[in-house]
């Protein structure tokens, strides 16, 4: 028997498990710190993007195969160490994603009201770590930093009416807070221009159909239309959306302004954020930006930095600090230790990008471990956890948590998520 542990039950973890479970004589344990599986699908993908979240049914298919086991509510680093896992399993695959925000390294970034996207997204998606975030929504201005899809998710969620969350699984505390929100002006800051955005067309297009919010682009920021011809088709479509936003009058009560060539250089306020100091930028020949010296201030009671994520380092595991991911040779970190998904590649690509990644790492691991080295595997982990009084949450337990969440849902919503680990365990009678 071959024994493999995957740390992290998000898309990268389950796509890897999907490949591994097809092999003979294999036992795959998918370990997660939370009592609930699916990582970013549950707590990262926007709650109004239910069609993307539906991919969890595919992971459920993998989780229910005989060779795969979910080991929830077990914290690697606290309940069991990486070294112990490497001792117990033929291969340990880190699929821990990139849950930490890249730091916004400017003066004032530590003021109350400056929030990273991991925290804000986690808050509206019911991640137990961020349930108490309570973001200040009491001022009209919000500055969203970054020109990626997370910035779009954040701006859209801030702009939607309660009615537009119908059919979503946004958690009650976020739905209620957003319904009372005083936010009227959302400024999305991009340090480069419309041709350098990291936004995809579908997500940009959605902004054009919001009930009470209009996206706006200053036509002066757009390059001549003929220049769009050199863009790859997806990017061209995105820029076409931006061009359509130049025509928007201020007819709706909420505005979403794209502020291009705009780099935040400081955040100021008396005890909390009140304004962002922005410097105009221009692009060098290599398309990097540099400041022009011209500055201006934007009023804001909330700043959400959406500038990318990092994988938290694990003591003893080689790490690439510049890239914010584990150091690996195409996924091999150390003998018996691997990385997959964002923990391997860094935080880029869609959920689907993890499918070929998971398949490749799964096949690599199968090749490396051969028939296995007779390690203790599952029974060994179970004995270790029992000796530490740690009771994992099983997949069957998760199904009970899910049933309770579905039963609690009102108004045709798919579920009312539990937002604390205690509530999840209480649903199991623990
Ligand atoms: P991202 O796509 O890497 O975008 C990060 C943005 O932050 C870039 O515009 C970048 O600008 C900017 N930035 C970085 N450092 C900055 C700084 N110091 N000051 C100002 N701006 C800075 O990251 P993301 O939006 O977090 O998304 C992560 C991944 O998840 C992406 O692959 C994304 O497509 C994916 N995602 C997909 C969906 C979806 O498909 N619906 C939804 C959410 C996320 P530069 O280009 O100038 O560096």
Image: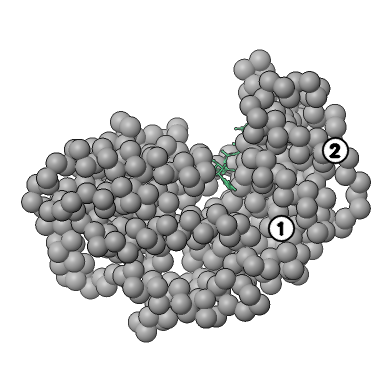
Residue at 47% x, 79% y: name it. Answer: 404
Q: Position of residue 394 (x, y in %)?
A: 31, 70
Task: Tell me if residue 396 can be seen.
Answer: yes
139 and 240: which one is in front?
Answer: 240
* Name of the residue lying farthest toward the bottom: 429
Residue visible at 66% across and 77% down? 411
Image quarter (top left, top right, bottom left or bottom right) of the C terminus: bottom left
Identify the residue under disc 1. Answer: 158
Relative height, residue 3 to residue 72 (above, below)? above
* Residue at 16 percent of width and 42 percent of height: 369
**Label 2 Cα neighbours within 10 Å, binned few <14 / some 14-19 / many ≥20:** some
Instruction: Relative to 190, say whether 141 is above or below.
Output: below
Q: From the viewer's perspective, tell me whether residue 133 is left or right of residue 249.
A: left
The answer to which image quadrant residue 366 occupies is: top left
Q: Nearer the viewer, mark 1 or mark 2?
A: 2
Q: Quadrant of residue 277?
A: top right
Q: Nearer the viewer, residue 53 or 145?
A: 53
Label 1 vs 2, first from the N-terminus: 1
* Residue 416, above or below 369: below
Disc 1 element? helix
Q: Which residue is mark 2?
A: 246
Q: Position of residue 36 (x, y in %)?
A: 41, 66
- Tell me where residue 289 appears, x and y as whole percent: 66, 25
Mark 2 C-beta to ligand 1 under 8 Å: no
Secondary structure beneath dot 2 equals: helix
Which percent across, then down, holds residue 317?
29, 42
Residue 273 seen in this snapshot: no
For marks 1 and 2, give the CA distance: 21 Å
The quarter of the rendering in which ligand 1 is drawn is: top right
């Amino acid at each position: 028997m071959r024994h493999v542990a995957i740390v992290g039950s998000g898309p990268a973890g389950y796509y890897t498990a999907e490949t591994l479970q097809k092999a003979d004589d294999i036992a795959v344990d998918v370990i997660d710190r939370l009592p609930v599986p699916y990582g970013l699908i549950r707590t990262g993908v926007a709650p109004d993007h239910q069609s993307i979240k539906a991919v969890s049914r595919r992971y459920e298919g993998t989780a229910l195969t005989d060779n795969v086991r979910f080991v929830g509510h077990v914290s690697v680093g606290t309940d069991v160490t990486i070294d112990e896992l490497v001792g117990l399993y033929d291969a340990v695959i880190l699929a821990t994603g990139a849950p930490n925000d890249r730091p916004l390294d400017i003066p004032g970034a530590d003021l109350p009201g400056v929030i990273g996207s991991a925290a804000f997204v986690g808050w509206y998606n019911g991640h137990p770590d961020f349930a108490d975030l309570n973001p200040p929504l009491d001022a009209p201005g919000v500055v969203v930093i970054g020109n990626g899809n997370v910035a779009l998710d954040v701006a859209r969620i801030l702009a939607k009416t309660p009615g537009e969350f119908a059919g979503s699984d946004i958690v009650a505390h976020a739905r209620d807070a957003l319904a009372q929100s005083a936010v009227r002006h959302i400024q999305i800051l991009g340090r480069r221009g419309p041709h350098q955005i990291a936004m995809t067309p579908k997500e940009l297009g959605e902004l054009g159909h919001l009930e009470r919010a209009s996206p706006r682009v200053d036509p002066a920021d757009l390059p001549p239309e003929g220049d769009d011809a050199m863009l790859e088709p997806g990017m061209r479509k995105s820029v076409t959306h931006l061009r359509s936003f130049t025509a928007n009058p201020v007819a709706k009560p909420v505005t979403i302004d794209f502020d291009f060539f705009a780099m935040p250089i400081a955040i100021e306020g008396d005890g909390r954020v009140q304004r962002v100091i922005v410097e105009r930028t221009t692009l060098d020949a290599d398309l990097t930006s540099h400041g022009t010296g011209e500055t201006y201030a934007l009023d804001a009671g909330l700043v959400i930095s959406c500038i990318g994520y990092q994988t938290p380092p694990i003591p003893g595991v080689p790490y690439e600090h510049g890239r914010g991911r584990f150091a690996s040779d195409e996924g091999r970190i150390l003998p018996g230790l691997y990385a997959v998904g964002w923990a391997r590649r860094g935080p880029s690509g869609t959920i689907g990008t993890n499918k070929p990644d998971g398949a490749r790492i799964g096949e690599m691991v199968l090749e490396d471990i051969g028939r296995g080295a007779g390690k203790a595997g599952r029974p060994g982990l179970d004995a270790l956890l029992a000796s530490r009084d740690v009771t994992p949450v099983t997949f069957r337990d998760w199904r009970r948590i899910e049933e309770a969440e579905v039963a609690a849902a009102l108004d045709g919503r798919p579920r009312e998520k539990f937002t604390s680990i205690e509530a999840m365990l209480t649903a199991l009678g623990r």
